[in-house]
């Protein structure tokens, strides 16, 4: 039986209830700093329950000084039972292993649970996974039912900083071109280091997945920790570039590669190794516009229960750093990360959208995180079907998209040097893409994952491993889709006309760009590796060129008109397939769109005409 005092305080929304409720577990020391957040969410129509200081009682009926995951979960279950509209759970405070030895710490900590690792224990030293997923999984089937996030503040001041960022992120209106960060996605990629074969397989698959899932209308940058790659900046500048990709502002900043509790991997060169990110680098993170959401597809970067705070926590406390971080609390494995990453991409970019230029309905990060996890195992055991497909087709996997077969296949044979390959393969038809990719990932895991007979168990581990360091109610300013008309082909030296509609003023940018499939050549003189000023200048130049796809653009301020017609002069020397990208921003939000265009060679007659 619950004593009356143990029932959480219900706070009613200050406008019409939106039908959803959020539970917050908050130690009393943070209660005052939490207040602005509670008011802000009540004003959005959420009902808010604050479970303050839920602590068990001993046999004498007195409260014990520390709480336990099991007791907290019993309070959450009781609340959800009494009000099923509770869909979100926000935990306030850090978790630490040694609660009992630090009575003062127990006043500001919310413990996390430990669950037994099924598969990853074979690859790391820990046999258990620290997880808040335990609190979100109401029926103990490993799948979360609540969207859970944690603000790992150590002090009320830190909590105030985090809350200020959240409110600023949702309310700040950056007008016009200042909002272009919302179409930017920055990827930092380490090198797998498993074996050249598996590394190239992983790299090729990651590029394929990103390209297939993210429209050409988005700006996708790649920074790769491999000195042979066109996407590698000078290795000694790598750390600065890692941070600069956060600081320039972006929708998502993603690290894929080896990670540790306080640092990321290194760039290896024949002469020396250079860091990607080291302990202390978080202090240099100050995004100039647009606070990124940082995602780590890496081990340990979210080990928030260790004695010292992890990278995810260090970044979250920066006043102008990421507004939220997603990271793993222990060893993470390629298959689990690939599946989780794909489901995240699908939740963010793959949802059906309106036809018009309506900005996408604000979706919250907690729901994206929850759905991504829930979808990881929705397609039940693939192993058998994949196995039989392979056996029946003598090496050709029918369920893989043709593009994937050619990328992965030729990569596996190792016939072409890495640096001459395109960054991204062509996009798959939308809708089919995700299923085809999932089949590809499953097939690759079945062929090469050391736990290939226990893939579902690996996925269950990853349900527990990935954490959201942030507010599950955070509304994302995702771009809507901007539809426009542009010709399918245009002559070099001619004019490309882009027509479309964008409501209520704002700014529109039309752009002719290189497709992501365009190969980028690494100059021969890069090999063998040198660290001379000339060699570094070449690395930087090639890196910048590889990430800059823009050829020409025109920006237009819309006043009262709702339609636009922009003309792009096509340079004389272009030929082949290019991309028309359009970015629109107005008071309702931002939108992006893209279309293919073929540039045909200039014909002599039109050259003559222009000369007159
Ligand atoms: Ca569950
Ligand atoms: Ca911590």
Image (spheres, rainbow, N blue to C red):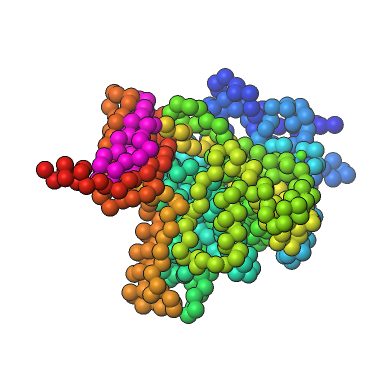
Residue 377 x %, y %: 73, 44
Dominant secondary structure of the magenta stretch? strand
Res. 77 visible in picture: yes
The residue sitting at the left extreme is: 612
502 in the magenta segment: yes
* Quadrant housing the N terminus: top right
Res. 318 visible in picture: no
Residue 539 x %, y %: 39, 68
Residue 174 x %, y %: 37, 38
Q: With 127 as the anchor, is 186 left or right in this view? A: left
Residue for point 37% across, 59% down:
544
Name the one closer to the observer, 541 or 307: 541
Residue for point 37% across, 31% down:
485
The residue sitting at the right extreme is: 59
Residue for point 50% across, 48% down:
426
Q: How many marks?
A: 0
Q: Quadrant of residue 144?
A: top right
Residue for point 65% across, 39% down:
371
Q: Quadrant of residue 582?
A: top left
Question: Which residue range is magenta in the image?
Answer: 484-512
Name the one closer to the observer, 543 or 145: 543
Name above or below for residue 137 compared with residue 196: above
128 in the magenta segment: no
* Quadrant housing the C terminus: top left
The residue sitting at the front extreme is: 605
Q: With 176 as the anchor, is 322 left or right in this view? A: right
Residue 602 x %, y %: 26, 47
Name the one closer to the observer, 229 or 576: 576
Name the one closer to the observer, 251 or 199: 199
């Amino acid at each position: 039986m619950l004593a009356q005092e143990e029932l959480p305080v219900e706070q009613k929304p200050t406008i019409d209830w939106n039908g959803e409720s959020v539970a917050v577990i908050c130690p009393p020391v943070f209660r005052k700093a939490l207040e602005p957040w509670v008011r802000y969410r009540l004003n959005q129509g959420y009902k808010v329950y604050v479970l303050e200081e839920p602590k068990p009682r001993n046999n004498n009926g007195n409260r014990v000084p520390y709480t336990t995951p099991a007791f907290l979960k019993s309070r959450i279950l009781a609340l959800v039972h009494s009000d099923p509209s509770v869909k979100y759970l926000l935990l306030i405070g850090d978790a630490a292993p040694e609660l009992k030895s630090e009575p003062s710490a127990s006043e500001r900590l919310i413990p996390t649970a430990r669950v037994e690792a099924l598969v990853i224990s074979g690859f790391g030293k820990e046999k258990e996974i620290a997880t808040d997923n335990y609190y979100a999984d109401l029926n103990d089937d490993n799948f979360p039912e609540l969207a859970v996030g944690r603000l790992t503040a150590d002090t009320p001041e830190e909590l105030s900083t985090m809350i200020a960022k959240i409110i600023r992120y949702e309310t700040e209106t950056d007008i016009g071109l200042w909002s272009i960060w919302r179409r930017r996605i920055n990827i930092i990629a380490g090198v797998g280091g498993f074996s050249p074969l598996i590394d190239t397989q992983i790299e090729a698959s990651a590029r394929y997945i990103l390209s297939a899932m993210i429209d050409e209308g988005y700006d996708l940058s790649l920074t790769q920790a491999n000195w042979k790659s066109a996407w590698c900046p000078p290795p000694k500048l790598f750390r600065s570039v890692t941070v600069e990709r956060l600081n320039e502002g972006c929708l998502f900043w993603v690290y894929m590669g080896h990670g540790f509790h306080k640092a990321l991997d290194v760039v290896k060169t024949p002469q020396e190794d250079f860091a990607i990110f080291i302990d202390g680098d978080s202090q240099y993170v100050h995004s100039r516009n647009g606070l990124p959401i940082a995602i780590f597809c890496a081990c340990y970067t979210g080990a928030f229960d260790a004695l010292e705070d992890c990278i995810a926590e260090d970044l979250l406390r920066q006043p102008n750093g990421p507004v939220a971080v997603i990271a793993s609390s222990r060893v993470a494995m390629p298959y689990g990360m690939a599946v989780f990453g794909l489901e995240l991409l699908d939740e963010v970019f793959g949802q059906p959208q309106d036809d018009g230029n309506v900005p996408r309905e604000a979706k919250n990060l907690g729901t994206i995180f929850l759905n991504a996890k829930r979808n990881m195992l929705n397609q039940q055991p693939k192993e058998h079907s994949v196995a039989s497909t392979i056996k029946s087709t003598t090496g050709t996997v029918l369920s893989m998209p043709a593009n994937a077969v050619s990328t992965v296949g030729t990569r596996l044979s190792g016939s072409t040097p890495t640096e001459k390959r395109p960054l991204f393969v062509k996009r798959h038809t939308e809708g089919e893409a995700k299923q085809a990719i999932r089949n590809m990932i499953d097939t690759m895991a079945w062929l090469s994952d050391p736990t290939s007979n226990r893939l579902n168990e690996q996925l269950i581990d990853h349900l527990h491993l990935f954490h959201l360091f942030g507010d599950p109610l955070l509304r994302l300013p995702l771009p809507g889709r901007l539809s426009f008309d542009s010709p399918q082909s245009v002559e070099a030296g001619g004019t490309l006309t882009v027509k479309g509609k964008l409501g209520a003023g704002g700014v529109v940018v039309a752009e002719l760009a290189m497709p992501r499939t365009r190969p980028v050549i690494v100059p021969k003189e890069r090999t063998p590796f040198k660290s001379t000023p000339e060699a570094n200048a070449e690395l930087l130049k090639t890196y910048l060129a590889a990430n800059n796809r823009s050829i020409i653009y025109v920006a237009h301020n819309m006043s009262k008109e709702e339609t636009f017609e922009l003309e792009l002069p096509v340079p004389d020397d272009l030929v082949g397939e290019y991309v028309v990208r359009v970015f629109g921003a107005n008071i309702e939000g931002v939108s992006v769109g893209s279309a293919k265009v073929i540039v045909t060679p200039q014909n002599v007659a039109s050259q003559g005409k222009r000369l007159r």
